Image: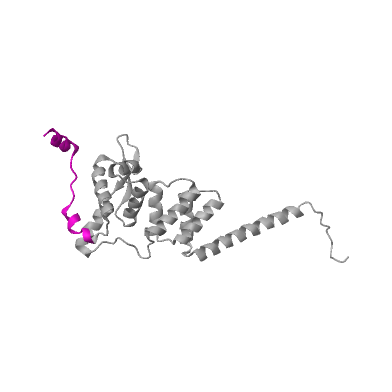
Amino acid sequence: MTEIYDWLKEGFTAVPNRFFQQFYRLDLSSDEALLLLYILSASRQNMVADDMQRIGRQLGWSHETVFQHLNSLMSKNYLTIELVPDETGKQRDHYSLRPFFEQLDALDKHGKTDTTQKNAPDYKQRSELIQHFEEEFGRSLTQMELEQINQWLLDDQYDIAVILLALKEAVIHQALSLKYIDTILLNWEKRNIRTVQEAQAEINRRNQRRQGGFQANQTTDAYQNVDIPIINWSHD
């Protein structure tokens, strides 16, 4: 009896019946569904977004497995990260299932969820892209950084090759931050540059303009100290 009382004090997680009624339409694996329900439970405990060790420990998963399923839920528009103030008023990153419940609610209106985006890359492509970033950054990406990459892919629908080219530009200019890379991508988008060929052409044009300006400055400097005779071409 005491054990049951202890369970009651720990609380329960309420799961809408619609989740089970519409499960076959949600495009969720059993592990993804388990993680989703776990996050639903943990949301009442103010679980922060960087607490993947806790998730792995309680679900018996490796760090890589946790990362894989979190990334998959984000790519299906079921999970996002929101800033929530803690008890001290400091803003912290927390997982939010708001997009999932919006999708679940949409089932009544449209009969299916929008779990995929047109031309959206698959999990392997996303994983390889993230691996490129982590190799260049020399560390694992944070959850906020992962969400930014997902936003490029799903919301902005940037081509992976274009994102990699922007990453290359950041490496060349020694400005390894997603904010810098996002600025590059936004500038290209404003110029209606959507393919890697167009982006590379824009880079080449900028480099040529810079090189031309550099050479012009060199020429000016070279002739600054040269005495040029003044010739009067008028006839007396």
> Where the N terminus falls, by quadrant?
top left
Residue range highlighted in magenta: 1-24
Q: Spot the residue most to the left.
A: 1
Location of residue 210 in the rendering, given as x and y in whole percent from the top left corner = 62, 57
Q: Please say whether residue 152 is visible from this viewpoint.
A: no
Q: Tell me if residue 20 is in the magenta stretch.
A: yes
Q: Is residue 35 above or below residue 125?
A: above
The quarter of the picture where residue 108 lies is bottom left
Location of residue 226 in the rendering, given as x and y in whole percent from the top left corner = 80, 54
Q: Main secondary structure of the magenta part?
A: helix
- Name the residue: 29% across, 48% down: 96
Q: Tell me if residue 117 is in the magenta stretch.
A: no
Q: Nearer the viewer, residue 148 or 88?
A: 148
> Where the C terminus falls, by quadrant?
bottom right
Q: Is residue 84 above or below residue 75?
A: above
Relative placement, left or right, of 90 versus 189 is left
Location of residue 41 in the rendering, given as x and y in whole percent from the top left corner = 23, 44
